[in-house]
Amino acid sequence: MSTDARVEALLRGEAPRVLGALVRRYGRFDACEDAVQEALLAAAGQWPEQGLPDNPRAWLIRVAARRLTDQLRSDAARRRREEGSASAGELVSPAADEEQPDLDDTLTQLFLCCHPALSPPSQVALTLRAVGGLTTAEIARAFLAPEGTIAQRISRAKASIKSSGVPFGMPAEAERAERLRAVLHVLYLIFNEGYTATAGSELVRFGLTAEAIRLTRQVHRLLPHTGEVAGLLALMLLTDARRAARTRPDGSLVPLAEQERSRWNRAAIEEGARLVADALARSPVGPYQLQAAIAAVHAEAESADATDWREILGLYEILARISPNPMTALNHAVARAMVDGPRAGLGMLTALERDDRVAGHHRLDAVRAHLLEMAGEAAAARASYQRAARRTTSLPERRYLESRAAHLAGAAS
């Protein structure tokens, strides 16, 4: 690993701890977060050239606290000028902020960034900024969004937290489980966007998948006996294990059935399978554990033909009962088709065509096309592939769907 990469990894790991130290002392999440970002940028510029300080976290806390107190003094001076007041108020010494440097605030920060007052896109952006340590520009590049849009989203999120008056700390016991669900959902969204980008020329954005796995590992370290945390980490590892085989050298998509399984990451598969097996044995069953169990069945099959589709179908039936949603229903339909034939799967798609959450989505068209192709209805399948290609904003997915349509057209001629 290069020096720059080591510094980047260290900074992202320290970001929530440094922010937590400042927020505990000053109680100003918005101002503290800005100061921490400045300290991270300063470290990224200095440490690769000058070497790491003896205590990197203390260095970051000290620099961030100085930036913060400078800003607070500037704000206080501006208010005095505006109000004509001689009272500046007392500021805390930056050095005092270095107390308790070993506290890990990752989970507290995640709970704060996933406050229910924020929309999911705002939760994602703020989590990547405040907990992941990514700059606004990095987040914008990851989501192919204008930097100004991401900056506004983060600014509004911080303003919402400030206006809510929520203190820095773990939420009350009554709301902790619900907030944890929000945290896991945000990490799941970050991973999914990285694993299959919704737009652009690349199928995978490795920076997002790696960040989601890193943050989920931290939550698992802090909550090792929570089954759904282990399930989500297992799901990410088992899914990401296929990454090297998902694209060809030209970046085109390789579907699961055609992937060269020798290229799958066996260490990640073994870790993920172990995590989900342990979680299912000792915890109430949850949707992330079930999705991880499905991924494990795929991962442990020696070939596509050896996949135990009956087991996968049974798992999807349980998942559909405890956590129904249209994407689960789409995958459930594929599993049903693999066990009972394409007509059975196509029958399950009828209800989804009336579901506003997925009607008109390219994935519904793509699944329908696949099942129609299995049923031997080449013309109808080709039309569905073409419709799916028009609807997706992902260039690799569009090219794959167009290639399937062209293949069917060639076979018919």
Image (cartoon, grey):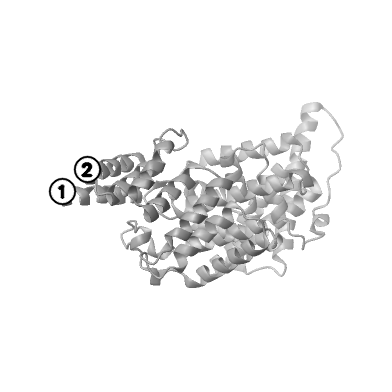
| Left or right relative to 304: residue 185 | right
Residue sitting at x 56%, y 41%? 121
**Residue type, numbered disc 2:** Ala
Which secondary structure, mark 1?
A: helix
Q: Are marks 1 and 2 in contact (CB under 8 Å)?
A: yes
Mark 1 and mark 2: span between their CA atoms?
8 Å
Q: Which residue is mark 2?
A: 379
Q: Where does the image place residue 115, in percent across and percent down from the top left?
A: 68, 42
Please give the label number shown on residue 412.
Answer: 1
Q: In the rendered structure, which disc, 1 or 2, sits on the residue that comes first in sequence?
A: 2
Residue sitting at x 54%, y 50%? 319
Which secondary structure, mark 2?
A: helix
Q: Where does the image place residue 35, in percent across and percent down from the top left?
A: 68, 49
234, 80: nearer the viewer:
234
Q: Where does the image place residue 10, in percent across and percent down from the top left?
A: 62, 64
Would residue 132 be visible to someone looking at this image? Answer: yes
Residue sitting at x 76%, y 37%? 165
| Left or right relative to 120: residue 255 | left
Which residue is most to the left?
413
